[in-house]
Amino acid sequence: MSRTDGNLKIAFANESQTNIEYLAYAHKAMDDGLMEIAQLFREAAGAEIVHALSHLQAMGVVRTTKENLEEASEGEDLEISSMYPKFIEEAISEGREEAVKSFTIAFEREKHHRAMFRQALRQLK
Ligand SMILES: [Fe+2]
Ligand SMILES: [Fe+2]
Protein backbone atom coordinates (compact mmCIF):
# COMPACT_ATOMS: atom_id res chain seq x y z
CA MET A 1 0.00 0.00 0.00
CA SER A 2 1.42 3.41 -0.99
CA ARG A 3 1.51 6.33 1.44
CA THR A 4 -1.37 7.98 -0.40
CA ASP A 5 -3.44 4.80 -0.24
CA GLY A 6 -2.86 4.73 3.50
CA ASN A 7 -3.66 8.43 3.82
CA LEU A 8 -6.89 8.02 1.84
CA LYS A 9 -7.92 5.24 4.19
CA ILE A 10 -7.24 7.37 7.25
CA ALA A 11 -8.92 10.46 5.79
CA PHE A 12 -11.96 8.41 4.75
CA ALA A 13 -12.31 6.89 8.23
CA ASN A 14 -11.85 10.30 9.83
CA GLU A 15 -14.41 12.09 7.65
CA SER A 16 -16.95 9.28 8.08
CA GLN A 17 -16.52 9.32 11.83
CA THR A 18 -16.75 13.10 11.97
CA ASN A 19 -20.02 13.01 10.03
CA ILE A 20 -21.65 10.83 12.69
CA GLU A 21 -20.14 12.82 15.54
CA TYR A 22 -21.49 16.09 14.10
CA LEU A 23 -24.94 14.55 13.70
CA ALA A 24 -24.85 13.49 17.35
CA TYR A 25 -23.67 17.00 18.34
CA ALA A 26 -26.54 18.47 16.30
CA HIS A 27 -29.03 16.28 18.21
CA LYS A 28 -27.54 17.49 21.48
CA ALA A 29 -27.69 21.14 20.40
CA MET A 30 -31.34 20.64 19.39
CA ASP A 31 -32.11 19.06 22.77
CA ASP A 32 -30.54 22.14 24.34
CA GLY A 33 -32.71 24.41 22.16
CA LEU A 34 -29.65 25.76 20.29
CA MET A 35 -31.11 25.54 16.78
CA GLU A 36 -28.48 27.63 15.00
CA ILE A 37 -25.66 25.55 16.43
CA ALA A 38 -27.60 22.40 15.51
CA GLN A 39 -27.85 23.71 11.94
CA LEU A 40 -24.12 24.47 11.87
CA PHE A 41 -23.33 20.89 12.92
CA ARG A 42 -25.77 19.46 10.38
CA GLU A 43 -24.34 21.51 7.54
CA ALA A 44 -20.77 20.57 8.42
CA ALA A 45 -21.86 16.91 8.74
CA GLY A 46 -23.17 17.09 5.16
CA ALA A 47 -19.85 18.44 3.92
CA GLU A 48 -17.98 15.59 5.67
CA ILE A 49 -20.09 13.11 3.66
CA VAL A 50 -18.96 14.82 0.45
CA HIS A 51 -15.32 14.59 1.59
CA ALA A 52 -15.68 10.94 2.60
CA LEU A 53 -17.35 10.00 -0.70
CA SER A 54 -14.68 11.81 -2.66
CA HIS A 55 -11.89 9.98 -0.78
CA LEU A 56 -13.73 6.70 -1.34
CA GLN A 57 -13.88 7.44 -5.06
CA ALA A 58 -10.13 8.11 -5.13
CA MET A 59 -9.57 4.81 -3.29
CA GLY A 60 -11.25 2.98 -6.16
CA VAL A 61 -13.29 0.75 -3.89
CA VAL A 62 -16.62 1.40 -5.59
CA ARG A 63 -16.86 -1.25 -8.30
CA THR A 64 -19.73 -2.96 -10.09
CA THR A 65 -22.98 -3.45 -8.16
CA LYS A 66 -22.41 -7.20 -8.14
CA GLU A 67 -18.93 -6.70 -6.66
CA ASN A 68 -20.27 -4.13 -4.20
CA LEU A 69 -22.92 -6.61 -3.03
CA GLU A 70 -20.23 -9.28 -2.58
CA GLU A 71 -18.03 -6.87 -0.65
CA ALA A 72 -20.98 -5.76 1.49
CA SER A 73 -22.05 -9.29 2.37
CA GLU A 74 -18.48 -10.22 3.25
CA GLY A 75 -18.21 -7.14 5.47
CA GLU A 76 -21.46 -7.97 7.24
CA ASP A 77 -20.31 -11.57 7.58
CA LEU A 78 -17.09 -10.48 9.26
CA GLU A 79 -19.04 -8.41 11.79
CA ILE A 80 -21.38 -11.33 12.50
CA SER A 81 -18.82 -14.12 12.64
CA SER A 82 -15.99 -12.47 14.52
CA MET A 83 -16.17 -8.78 15.35
CA TYR A 84 -19.40 -8.42 17.33
CA PRO A 85 -19.27 -11.78 19.17
CA LYS A 86 -15.77 -10.84 20.43
CA PHE A 87 -16.79 -7.26 21.27
CA ILE A 88 -19.94 -8.42 23.13
CA GLU A 89 -17.94 -10.94 25.13
CA GLU A 90 -15.34 -8.35 26.10
CA ALA A 91 -17.97 -5.74 26.99
CA ILE A 92 -19.72 -8.31 29.22
CA SER A 93 -16.47 -9.17 30.96
CA GLU A 94 -15.78 -5.48 31.56
CA GLY A 95 -19.30 -4.83 32.83
CA ARG A 96 -20.09 -2.30 30.09
CA GLU A 97 -23.84 -2.73 29.87
CA GLU A 98 -24.52 0.06 27.39
CA ALA A 99 -21.83 -1.24 25.03
CA VAL A 100 -23.18 -4.81 25.32
CA LYS A 101 -26.63 -3.52 24.37
CA SER A 102 -25.35 -1.42 21.48
CA PHE A 103 -23.13 -4.21 20.08
CA THR A 104 -25.97 -6.75 20.43
CA ILE A 105 -28.50 -4.58 18.58
CA ALA A 106 -26.03 -4.04 15.72
CA PHE A 107 -25.01 -7.74 15.72
CA GLU A 108 -28.64 -8.85 15.31
CA ARG A 109 -29.28 -6.29 12.60
CA GLU A 110 -26.17 -7.21 10.58
CA LYS A 111 -27.66 -10.70 10.12
CA HIS A 112 -30.57 -9.09 8.34
CA HIS A 113 -28.24 -6.94 6.22
CA ARG A 114 -26.16 -9.97 5.19
CA ALA A 115 -29.31 -11.92 4.26
CA MET A 116 -30.63 -9.03 2.19
CA PHE A 117 -27.32 -8.54 0.35
CA ARG A 118 -27.04 -12.28 -0.36
CA GLN A 119 -30.60 -12.36 -1.64
CA ALA A 120 -29.96 -9.36 -3.90
CA LEU A 121 -26.83 -11.09 -5.23
CA ARG A 122 -28.76 -14.24 -6.09
CA GLN A 123 -31.41 -12.20 -7.87
CA LEU A 124 -28.78 -10.27 -9.81
CA LYS A 125 -26.99 -13.38 -11.11
FE1 LIG B 1 -14.06 17.14 6.09
FE1 LIG C 1 -24.79 -3.68 8.54
Image: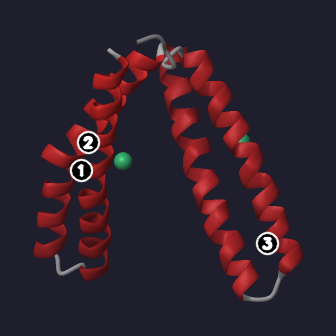
The reply to whether discs 2 and 1 touch (Cβ–Cβ < 8 Å) is yes
- Judging by the rendered image, the residue that carries numbered circle 3 is 38
The answer to which image quadrant residue 66 occupies is top left
- Marks 3 and 1 sit apart, C-alpha to C-alpha, by 34 Å
Label 3 or label 1, whichever comes before in sequence order: 3
Q: Residue at x 28, y 24 (%)?
A: 122
Q: Position of residue 96 (x, y in %)?
A: 24, 78
Task: Give, as a three-letter code, the residue at label 3.
Answer: Ala
Secondary structure category for the residue under label 2: helix
Q: Residue at x 32, y 41 (%)?
A: 116
- Judging by the rendered image, the residue that carries numbered circle 1 is 111
Q: Residue at x 10, y 74 (%)?
A: 93
- Judging by the rendered image, the residue that carries numbered circle 2 is 115
Label 2 or label 3, whichever comes before in sequence order: 3
Q: Is residue 88 left or right of residue 47?
A: left
- Marks 2 and 3 sit apart, C-alpha to C-alpha, by 36 Å
Residue sitting nearer the eye, 13 or 109 = 109
